[in-house]
Amino acid sequence: MGKILKYIDCNGIIIDTEKGLFDEYHKLKKTIPTLTKKDYLERIDWDEWIKKAPIVDNAIDVLKSHEASDTIILTKVSSIDEGVVKIDYLRNLGVKNTIGLVPYVLRKSQISYAKGNILFDNSISNLDYWYEAGGIPIYYSDKEHEFYPTTTSLDDVLSEKILEHPKIKTLQKRP
């Protein structure tokens, strides 16, 4: 097996940008019924929001303890402003990994080379598309998934220990 690239979802695995984000959206939706999620996300002051977003576990330290060249951070963005803020924030924390901005309307598997590479994500739909594109989906969760290897350890993914998970073999057998 050749070198495996590891694609890591940013939102919810590295930075918890989603915590409270959609609570506010649902409150606003009650007073502005026509407000779409996309419009809401485009209006957010991302400079302020990122300051409130906690780092998940010790994700920044774990990223910095591994080779940056074979790990790419992917983050869904609804605006260029959001993307710029996330990149600046991660760079200011000393993260050297490549950071890929995924437009809200695209899938991660559309902008990355999935085949034979890992996606560590907390979204089953992202993992489903990744798997369909020939990639290795790893589910970020403390609950087991029927098909996908599951862990909350970023270190296990970056060190490739996750490839020893019993579900890796069954993934390769799925039609």
Image (spheres, rainbow, N blue to C red):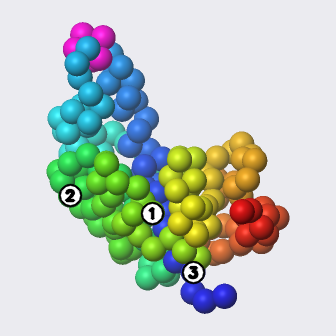
Foreground mark, 1 or 3, reads 1
Depth check, front residue: 88 or 38: 38
The residue positioned farthest toward the right in the image shown: 166
**Type of residue at label 3?**
Ile
Residue at 59% across / 62% down in the picture? 131
Image disc number at residue 4: 3
Q: Which residues are magenta?
A: 28-32
Residue 19 on image: x %, y %: 43, 35
Residue 66 % position (x, y):
53, 77
Question: What type is the residue that disc 1 sits on?
Answer: Ser
User: Crowding near pointer 2: few (<14 within 10 Å), some, many (20+)?
Assistant: some
Which residue is label 1 attached to? 109
Residue at image position (72%, 47%) is 145
Q: Residues within 10 Å of mark 3 (few under 14, many from 20)?
A: some
Relative height, residue 80 to residue 18 (above, below): below
Q: Quadrant of the C terminus?
A: bottom right
- Amino acid carrying label 2: it is Val
Residue 29: in magenta span: yes
Instruction: Give residue 34's mark.
Output: none
Query: Which quadrant of the view contains residue 41?
Result: top left
Going from N to C along the chain, the mark reached first, 3 or 2, is 3
Give the CA distance from mark 1 to mark 2: 21 Å
The residue under the point 53% across, 66% down is 133
- The picture places residue 26, in percent across and down from the top left corner, at 36, 20
Closer to the observer: label 1 or label 2?
A: 1
Residue identifier under label 2 = 84
Secondary element type, mark 1: helix
